[in-house]
Image: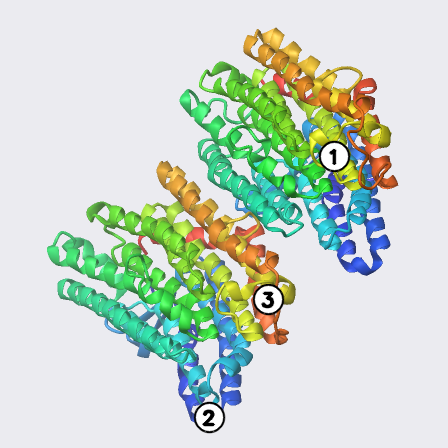
Amino acid sequence: MFTPETSMLLALLLPLVGGAFILLLGERNRNLREAATILTSLVLFTVVVGLTTDVMSGATPTLVMFDMVPGFAISFTAEPLGQIFALIASGLWIINSIYSIGYMRGNNEKNQTRFYLFFTIAISSAIGIAYAGNMLTLFVFYEVLTLSTYPLVTHSGKPAALAGGRMYLGILMATSIGLLFMGMMWTLSLTGTLEFTPGGILAGKAEGPLVGVLLFLYMFGIGKAALMPIHRWLPAAMVAPTPVSALLHAVAVVKAGVFSVVKVIVYIFGIDLLNSESSDNWLIYIAGYTIIAASIIALRQDNLKRRLAYSTVSQLSYVILAAAILAPISIVGAAFHIAAHAFGKITLFFAAGSIYTAAHKTEVSQLDGIGRRMPFTMAAFTIGAISMIGLPPTAGFISKWYILSGALETGQMFAIGVIIISTLLNAAYFLPIVYAAFFKPEVSPPKHPHGEAPLAIVIAISLTAIGTMALFFFPDIPLGLAQTLAQTAAGGN
Amino acid sequence: MTAEPNIFLILLVIIPLMAAPICVLTRNANVAWSISMAVAWAVLGIAIKLVMELSAHDKVLYYRIGGWDAPWGIEYALDKVGGLVILVVASIGALTLTYAKRSVEKEITSERIYLFYAMLMLCISGLLGIAITGDAFNLFVFMEISSLSSYVLISLGKDKRALTSAFNYLIMGTIGATFYIIGVGMMYMMTGTLNIADLSSILPAVADTRTILVALAFLTVGISLKLALFPLHMWLPGAYAFAPSVVTIFLAATATKVSLYVLIRIFFTMFGRIDVFETFPLQPVLFGMALAAMFIASLAAIWQQNIKRMLAYSSIAQVGYMVLGIAIATEAGLTGGIIHIFNHALIKGSMFMAVGAMAFGLGVTTINDMAGIGRRMPLVMAAFVVGGLGLIGIPLTVGFVSKWALVSAALDAEMWPLAALILLSSLLAVIYVWRVVEVAYMRPSPENAKQPVQVPFSMLAPMWVLALASVWFGANATFTMDLAHSAAGHLMEGF
């Protein structure tokens, strides 16, 4: 239908066009406004899917737009990793929109037009990040994503939301301006280029401790990947409405973070360079520490959303750990885990939002026996939890399998240990919830008897739960893309 | 160096200079505004023509007053860095005049309005003159024209404190001008010339003398006063805060920039054939003052309650960035300093216009007055936010381009702590900008809030032109970067 180049541009602009319609229609035509959101997301997904075959066949369509500063253009390239991210972001946006409609109306949220408008901008910037052809383009959209999600995080306008928003903006801006930008400019100064190149651009230009320093600037500069100790923005952002949490944790924001991490490791540093240097070994330990520490914190949270938030921090570092193992097969795991975690975690957040909408409950300790009142919600929650733990028949199993294989192949005993311990910890903080929901009796009947959440929410949550399992049974597309990526990464030498 | 005289050079100065007395003679606000408006846009037309000529033919444009050859007569010379400055002054001048009519009617007593326009014309004329003159003494004359008229402009503010602020500025500005002329006098004593190009070729012969060292010190300190380089900035916050909105817009976007141009002229043209940064202990001093400005003034901005005062402190910090770029003293560093002159004019111009519109619509003076203004004056506040993002240096704004240029210059010169400090200080901008954004959008309007007066299109349009320009030149900086880069290249060659 379109050339791949046009499709990329279209994917970038479509959400913005949808946003313009949302703004024009406004609160007075709320049904039409919601239709505009859904329609845009469907068209966007179609366009992105259309690119998949090209990318899987190894093509890298490239679109150079214009020079932002002389010699450095805004440019877009579709490559396997970006394609995975674009598919997730655009696909989950459809489901998230359905869910948003149920949630925002069910809870009578204010300023819904603003909410949907900034959502479209966030999606557009996620697509921009996914298809960024060089570090400058990635940085531009990375910052736009931060800014466009700020009004979503602070949606309620209450003091708690403001405080959360400050933490959100403060950490993400401080890391991106202070560290990521510095890393980017330093790379530029060393190599004279910022193009994402298979095999990396730093090889031969940087060596010794400098590689470690640059890796530090990038890894902690990409605050959205939430390595400890810069993860605090993620729990702080829990004040946002649930669809926004889903956006942050599954659709766009943290995914943009780990995506950028993998992208930088594969296309800026290159696996070979990192394998040949020893100054970068710290990454695997920081990632391992984050996985374990965040799980232990999650264990102690009674607030359901906060527990999920710390679970995200832990799961993100799986991706970073997988990339840091630096074996092609673990890169497959890293890329696949971006998809697997997205489906699992969005299901869990939808479930939390569903419980809040129907039962007005937020704490884990209040959930005894709720599975009988909300069977769909809790069934979906269970599937999401199983994926987090990494058991079949869910997507989480596949990524963990690849990550473990990579760790075994390279003999990274530390990584193997971390994965085993964290699996146990994951089970320890998810399974009791499932047990309590289905097998414990209700302590006392709720003040206002409730059943399932609104239909839109149930549909959305069922779709993501099915998706989590579908990724286990039919992993071909993301796995194929991930393997192409791993070949590119390994073949760069 | 024999080129055809370019008559437009002298017209650039003469037209606004003549317009000033005509405005006085009319004694009528509307007529004075109409004349000034026509002159400002004509000046912009000439400026654009000159800049196009400059970028088309890679040469310097000349005009010799009375046909007397330099170095005996007064020579006007315009190169690319001067071209960038007249472009800034002329476009800000034209947009400010467009904006001025309604704002001035509200802020200045009606019988003085025609005088206001006369002074503004003088100020524009002086600032343009500084950028095109090739004569060190003539430069002083223009500096005094622009400064004296700006003292008057500031004192027209409604608040009584405008008078003391103007007086404060007058004292400091006069000291600065005096220091400059002392420096020029010493150079004249040693070289016997006032022509800048001539100075440039004779100075190396006497560079080792103590007199020249002292001259350079006087020049540097004098101009630093004018451009409000920390710690010589004390006059600026008061002057910006209490001047009429239009005056603040114009001065913030142009006056300090033109002084910076003079500093560049001194270091890279007058002293262009001497390696000033090697021969004299300039670099550590300038670095120290620039960094102090970036951090201390930004911190001060965080604590301000008065919105104009906050932006004024931010300006002092931004001057720090420009001076830092110059003091790196490489072509890349100079490019960063020069590009930030242009970029910062767009940013601060649009922000002060937004503040002026808020004052017009709701009488806003402090940040607390801005509660809920994001809903009540959405267009105005949005422009303010665009400017604010520029101050932080968010990509797709001009601020990012400046930061890019400065940081890469620092890294290329292997001054990486400097690069880190630039980025660190720009984080302070996040705080002082976001503080305002939160109040404007997140804090509810007060209970008894009055309905804002409709802000006229003549004020909204110039504001948005600048705001959009700051996005345009942020997303596509090829034109401005090329101009700044080749200007820097010229300067590094030493005229």
What amino acid is found at the position of numbered circle 2 in the picture?
Thr
Q: Position of residue A335 (x, y in %)?
A: 68, 23
Callout 1 crowding tier (Cα within 10 Å): few <14, some 14–19, many ≥20: many
Question: Which residue is tagged 3?
Answer: B446
Is residue A441 left or right of B451 when viewed as pictured? right
Under circle 3, the secondary element is loop
Eyeballing the image, is A13 above or below A492?
A: below
In front of the other: B475 or A20 = A20
User: Looking at the picture, do discs 1 and 3 lie on one chain?
Assistant: no
Of labels 3 and 2, the one closer to you: 3
Disc assigned to residue A352 = 1
Let me know if residue B69 appears in the view: no
Disc assigned to residue B26 = 2
**Sequence order check: which comes first, mark 3 or mark 2?**
2
Is residue B240 left or right of A376 when viewed as pictured? left
Q: CA distance from mark 1 to mark 2?
A: 73 Å
In front of the other: A265 or A439 = A439
Q: CA distance from mark 3 to mark 2?
A: 44 Å
Under circle 1, the secondary element is helix
Is residue A142 left or right of B157 when viewed as pictured? right
Q: Position of residue B39 (x, y in %)?
A: 49, 80
- Give the quarter of the image for residue A441: top right
Q: Position of residue B129 (x, y in %)?
A: 36, 72
Locate the N terminus of chain B by quadrant.
Answer: bottom left
Eyeballing the image, is B154 above or below B35?
A: above
What amino acid is found at the position of numbered circle 1 in the picture?
Ala
